Amino acid sequence: MASATLLFISSCEQKTSTGDTQSSGNPEKTEEPFVIAPRLVNNDGSFELLAVIDGAEANKQFVKNLDIVRAQKVIIKKLNDETEKTDETKQKIADVEKKLQENTDLMAKIYGYKADSDYLFIPVRTALVKLVDDKKELVKKIESPKTHHELQGMRAEYAELSKKDGESSTEVQALAAELLKEFNYDVKLKYEIEIGKGVLYRKVN
């Protein structure tokens, strides 16, 4: 089975097929909502709109379904890479391939997803949520993919730098202060990102 590639938005600008450019503001400015266009062009290529996934639960289920498909592909590859395949190994491959096909068919029915295509998933509307005593508290609503991308990038950078240089380093502390200022994000607390609306595009060239 061919392997699909799913790209999360990597650019702060998207151009629609009409040539219009949409740019989102930073957290200190009014965020411009993402305009869902039938076709979208960016540095990764040209894409056509496939599905609008509305609601936190629906987006959580989409990501879960995608993770399952990815995990099954990894298992199949690992089993196929074994030098000597016993009858038991061959049966395991057949069983996982059957489950993978079932899950791929389900995603095709719900989202129009095909395993041999490449995709672009854009989190149009998200929310930063703080986890406190098994409860969730809304910290910030994020209304543009650009701002979402900035937040995720800063979180990843902080995790990498703090592991490498330690939390007491000047650069790490400066980044922690910026996260607090821009997003009210305290690095000492636990958070999660909820996707309220996402759009799925399929690459056409």
Image (spheres, rainbow, N blue to C red):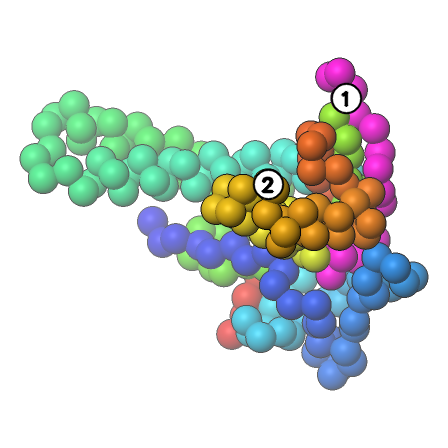
Indicate left or right for 200 with 116 as reference: right
Q: In this picture, which residue range is highlighted in magenta?
A: 132-148
Indicate left or right for 76 with 171 as reference: left
x and y percent of residue 66 in the render?
52, 41
Mark 1 to mark 2 CA distance (whole Å) = 22 Å
The residue indicated by pointer 2 is 167
Can you see residue 154? yes
Indicate left or right for 166 with 51 as reference: left
| Nearer to the camera, 44 or 203 | 44
Residue at screen point 49% across, 52% down: 114
| Nearer to the camera, 152 or 200 | 152
Q: Is disc 2 surrounded by few (<14), some (14 to 19) or many (20+) residues within 10 Å?
A: some
Q: What's the residue type where badge 1 is placed?
A: Val
| Nearer to the camera, 161 or 45 | 161
The residue indicated by pointer 1 is 132
Q: Is disc 1 surrounded by few (<14), some (14 to 19) or many (20+) residues within 10 Å?
A: few
x and y percent of residue 85 in the render?
11, 33
Residue 200: in magenta span: no
Can you see residue 196? no
Say which label, 1 or 2, has the lower sequence index: 1
x and y percent of residue 189 in the render?
71, 30
Residue 114 position (above or below residue 84) = below
Residue at screen point 80% across, 66% down: 24
Residue 72 position (above or below residue 126) = above
| The quarter of the displayed image where residue 69 is located | top left
Q: Are marks 1 and 2 in contact (CB under 8 Å)?
A: no
x and y percent of residue 94 in the render?
26, 32
Residue at screen point 56% across, 34% down: 64
Which labelled disc corresponds to residue 117? none
Residue situated furthest left in the rendering: 84
| The quarter of the displayed image where residue 82 is located | top left
| Nearer to the camera, 179 or 124 | 179
